[in-house]
Image (spheres, rainbow, N blue to C red):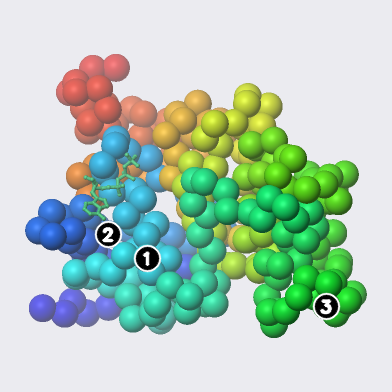
Amino acid sequence: METSPRKETAGELVRIEQLEVDFDGFKAIRGLDFSLSSGELRFLIGPNGAGKTTLLDVLCGKVKPSKGKVLFRNHVDLTKHQEHQIAQLGIGRKFQAPSIFVTLTVLENLLLSMRQKRGLLSSLIAQTTVEQRERMKYYLHMIGLEKKSKDKAGSLSHGEKQWLEIGMLLIQQPELLLLDEPAAGMTDSETEKTGELLHKISDQQTIIVVEHDMDFVRQFAKTVTVMHEGSVLCEGTMQEVQNDDKVAEVYLGRRGER
Ligand SMILES: Nc1ncnc2c1ncn2[C@@H]1O[C@H](COP(=O)(O)OP(=O)(O)OP(=O)(O)O)[C@@H](O)[C@H]1O
């Protein structure tokens, strides 16, 4: 039965209602409701198998739900769009493993990511407009790779590669950015810089971050959504969710203990 649309909140960017994802009879997402406002930096946490990655997969169109509504900017039904169309609508997804071109320079990687006609790299460089060059400079600075713009991407550290990939997404100026464990495998100082980068990005764009590193979440999260067995268990500040008995039970198998 089709549920009537709820009144949309001003500034709401994503609304998900009664989402269900079925993998050959196994419900990875069941009855999930979720809402996200423009400009939020939302962390998604939860034990292994809770459905966090599947939720990102639904948002970027990689996985199609069996039931439910997934609305973007109040009226766009994402379930009706293919992955490439969703990217064009302004939702960028970064997976855990970086997918950069290692034999190209940092700048060339950014250039290739910019929305423009496909063509030879040399002709893309020749055709870059002043606005595009400014945009590249701006994002190079944001990801902290200005001094490495001419270095081959393959020579970057693990953290730098991740930032480059985030930069490659940012340069397409998506409205919503989906990041899967952006700080995984990073050194402490790289992790710190990544948290700061997320905050800088969230001044302009909305971000959902799936994260396992609780220290990282504690340090950088404003609002946290805890998932468990395919639905939302609780939501709030990190302090609020840490004090929630249901969350303690799910993570530690204890009820009411802290
Ligand atoms: N393509 C698939 N086919 C069948 N089952 C799947 C598929 N993708 C995910 N699952 C199952 O769905 C459940 C949710 O998986 P998902 O990867 O979304 O969880 P997660 O919260 O991201 O977990 P983790 O933190 O371990 O990455 C898991 O039980 C997983 O095994």
Q: Nearer the viewer, mark 1 or mark 2?
A: 1
Q: Can you see residue 163?
A: yes
> For mark 2, what is the residue?
33
Determine whether the residue tagged by mark 2 lies in a helix, strand or loop.
Answer: strand
- Which of pointers 3 and 2 lies earlier in the amino acid sequence? 2
Residue of label 1: 62
- Residue 116 placed where, x, y %? 70, 79
Residue 233 visible in the displayed image? no
- Say which amino acid is labelled 1: Lys
Residue labelled 2 has its Cβ within 8 Å of some atom of ligand 1: no
Quadrant where the C terminus sits is top left
Q: Relative to 25, is 144 above or below?
A: above
Residue at 47% from the left image edge and 79% from the top image edge: 85
Q: Is residue 226 above or below residue 27?
A: above
Amino acid type at mark 2: Asp
The span from disc 1 to disc 2 (Cα, nearest Å) is 19 Å
Q: Which mark is residue 123?
A: 3
Q: Position of residue 57 (x, y in %)?
A: 37, 60
Q: Earlier in the sequence, mark 1 or mark 2?
A: 2
Residue type, numbered disc 3: Ser
At x 27% / y 32%, what residue is drawn?
A: 247
Counting from the top left corner in percent of width and height, residue 139 is at: 76, 57
On-image quarter of the N terminus? bottom left
Residue 5 at x, y percent in the picture: 27, 78
Q: Secondary structure at mark 1?
A: loop
- The answer to whether the residue bearing label 1 lies less than 8 angstroms from the nearest atom of ligand 1 is no
Q: Residue at x 80, y 75 (%)?
A: 124
Q: CA distance from mark 1 to mark 3?
A: 32 Å
Q: Earlier in the sequence, mark 1 or mark 3?
A: 1
Q: Name the residue nearer the viewer: 247 or 197.
A: 197
- Quarter of the image for residue 214 reads top left
